[in-house]
Image (spheres, coloured by chain):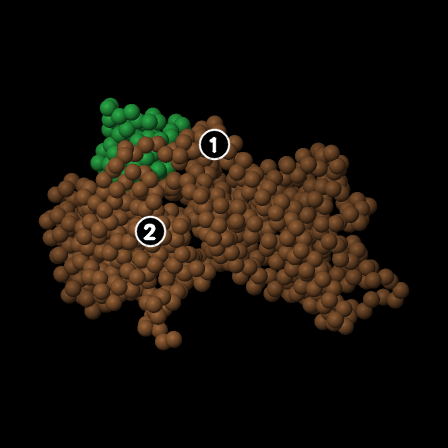
Chain colours: A green, B brown
Amino acid sequence: MKRLNDLPPGARASVVFIEAGHHAYHRLAELGLLPGEKLVMFNNCGTGPVTVCVKGSKLSMGHGLAGKIIVREERDGC
Amino acid sequence: MAAKGKLTVALAGNPNSGKSTIFNNLTGARQHVGNYPGVTVEKKEGSVVYKDREIVFVDLPGTYSLSAYSEEEIVARDFVVKEKPDVVVHIVDASNIERNLYLYTQLQELGVPVVLAMNMSDVAARKGMNIDYKELSRLLGKPVVPTVGSRNWGTQELLDTVIDLHEEKIKIEKIGVDYGGEISAEIEKLAQLLRERSGALEGYPLEWLAVKLLENDAWATGFIGGLPGGGEVLWQNEKSRGHLKRHFSDDPEVVIADRRYGFISGACTEAKSYSVEERHDLSDKIDKVVLNRFLGLPIFALVMYAIFKFTFTFSGPVVGWFEQFFGKAGELASNAIPEGLANSFVVDGVIAGVGGVLGFFPLVLFMFFAIAFFEDSGYMARAAFVMDRIMHKFGLHGKSFLPMMISTNGCAVPGIMATRTLDNKKDRLITMMVTPFMICGAKLPIFALFIGAFFAPEQGANIMFLMYALSVAIALGSALVLKKAVFKGETSHFVMELPPYRVPTIQGLLLKMWERGWLYIKKAGTIILLISIIIWAGFTFPQMEPKEGVNEETAASAQMEQSFAGRIGKFVEPAVRPLGMDWRGGVALMAGVAAKEVVVSTMGTMYSLGEVDPEEAEPLKEALQNDPSWSPLKASAFLMFCLIYLPCFVAMAVFYRESGPSMKWTLFLIFWTTVMAWAASFLVYQGGRLLGIGG
């Protein structure tokens, strides 16, 4: 288990849990990112926002929010 | 021709689904832009006569869902619930059906007839997706029309389907999300309670309300809580939510969102297949470069430079024509009206004032065009991403850069209006508050005049650059202070979609440019006339007889000293004296509130030079140099004040409207900028004197 902001570029993972508050949770859900969803990290510089591919679209989010998303990395990916 | 009837059709869809392109295809240029009552969300309407029917299209704001988390979503669902459009066309990005249909699952619960327009079906096909539109239509129970907005394909079919649906030649089936036994049972309990109170719920789909309650939707709980007997419903809702929470060991809203995606995924598995494996497309390749940690910022800077270069290169001649036009108009009026008050009123009050704003209009249009290009191509979302790292440190949002950028060398009025892209109210207010600190096009002549008059030519560019750097530092610093002291609490989480890159259509760009330009004219143009008249009157009255034997310029200067404005200048002199200014500085600064370039022309009048063109202020420069009451230090203090103080009246009026409208925040803005300007100017002047740089 990792936090999304610790995921290196190119890594595949599935969302396990989202710790964010009500508002942020909803924003993520309507953008297609919710527990169970598979995603691919597209861009992560270690600081600043990250970009992930989820449900066929690219989402960018602040580092803080990414830190509230717990994911399980998939070993077989990439 | 007798129309067979009038239909209202609402267009709903995600941002970036090509909704505006479809709207433009359906309505052509017959569009009307306004605001939804009470909010700053834009409302676009357009109509078309098709098969003897008048169809009015309302473009709902682009949203990802219909919760109550943003003004756009509330506006979109209020329109559907209250205005009851005859048909809702839901525009879906066919290359991204799953995410796009999330909105559909909520739309269909509102109980209105829905047509699905599968837009960008060509992109989907190119990506190797085979979508069986007939099958999808059967699974969802709604008509489905494939379209390609950028090529205007499928527009006729869409219109035909809308009419057929309205005239019930096509039947729709109610196939909703299966929330499962547990949740459905709770929905039914709540719906039953609501049914008993349905008198007060005229027109609201009750099951939808029940789902919203279970989702703990802030609007729904507030609305029901306010009804007679609503307490009982809320009590049942708490019970139901508690039960579901225990049952699923998760919040009900999480489970509900999950079921919606489950429903979509079920439909998509059957109606969609892949002929080729999805591979990295061009968008990914561009993003690898554009979002690169080292290349991101330089590319951003290059794009910004390109926007300015484009704007100033191409608008230059057109601005010239406008200036000539207003110059000619002034001349004609001056010759046509006998000399006196009426002449002065028309020439100096009306034409000069309105010309000042309209002269700026071509520049604004070109800038809007360039910005629309980068928006429609998909780059602006990346720019917000790149800037977020920096902006976040100052309590701002990645998207805050755009308003600040429009304001730099451009105008704070469209800048403040551009804060609409920020969906958090606090972020928006902070951004609006700091946007006017940027050096707008009208502040430039003041800097040019004073830097030219008091500093060596080889230093000029450096000092100008220093001014720009200061403006950015002041804006960001203020944002930080405002965030820490006034708008406490966390910055809203930054999450946004990076849409695929697309080639913008010329029609789309022109329409966008014109729409925003027209809004600018409406907001700026109407108020500026009033303000210019007031300012003109301030300098013209009370009238006094010129002394015998003095020339015209000296008389004008004396008149100004005696006018209301001059008297006010004398009155505020004690306040500006510690900043190294006399009453003339005070008057110029006050006149600058009308429009910043007026500072220069007012100086011109006071130095007995008559009319001074802000662009060619050579004689005024010499007059300032020769005036012993000025010095480089005093000039620096004066520039400091100009850099920070009050935005012009038009910007304040727009700020007032866009902030709520809120008088409280507008007064705060006035107070904040005045105090800051005075303090900074005081520091420069008195600090400089202490250091012995000059008196």
Q: Which amino acid type is marked by label 1? A: Gly
Count neighbours of disc 1 (C-alpha within 10 A) and say few if under 14, some if 14 to 19, many if 20 or more: some
Give me the C-alpha separation between circle 1 and circle 2. 35 Å
Name the quarter where the C terminus of chain B is drawn. top right
Q: Report whether B423 appears left or right of B229.
A: right
Q: What residue is pinned by disc 2? A: B147
Q: Which residue lies furthest to the top in this view?
A: A75
Mark 2 or mark 1, which is nearer the start of the sequence? 2
Q: Report whether B312 appears left or right of B260.
A: right
Q: Which amino acid type is marked by label 2? A: Thr
Q: What residue is pinned by disc 1? A: B296
Q: Report whether B422 appears left or right of B265.
A: right
Give the x, y percent position of residue B308.
58, 43
The kind of secondary structure element at disc 2 is: loop
Give the x, y percent position of residue B590.
65, 55
Which residue is drawn at the image coordinates 29% and 38% (left, top)?
B128
Which residue is drawn at the image coordinates 30% and 51% (left, top)?
B146
Which residue is drawn at the image coordinates 22% and 62% (left, top)?
B170
Q: Write down the chain letter for disc 1.
A: B
The kind of secondary structure element at disc 1 is: helix
Location of residue A5 by image quarter: top left
Count neighbours of disc 2 (C-alpha within 10 A) and say few if under 14, some if 14 to 19, many if 20 or more: many
| Res B481 visible | no
Cβ–Cβ under 8 Å for marks 1 and 2:
no
Name the quarter where the N terminus of chain B is drawn. bottom left
Residue nearest the observer in this picture, B220 or B385: B385
Q: Write down the chain letter for disc 2.
A: B
Residue B86 vertical position relative to residue B127 in the rendered view, above or below: below
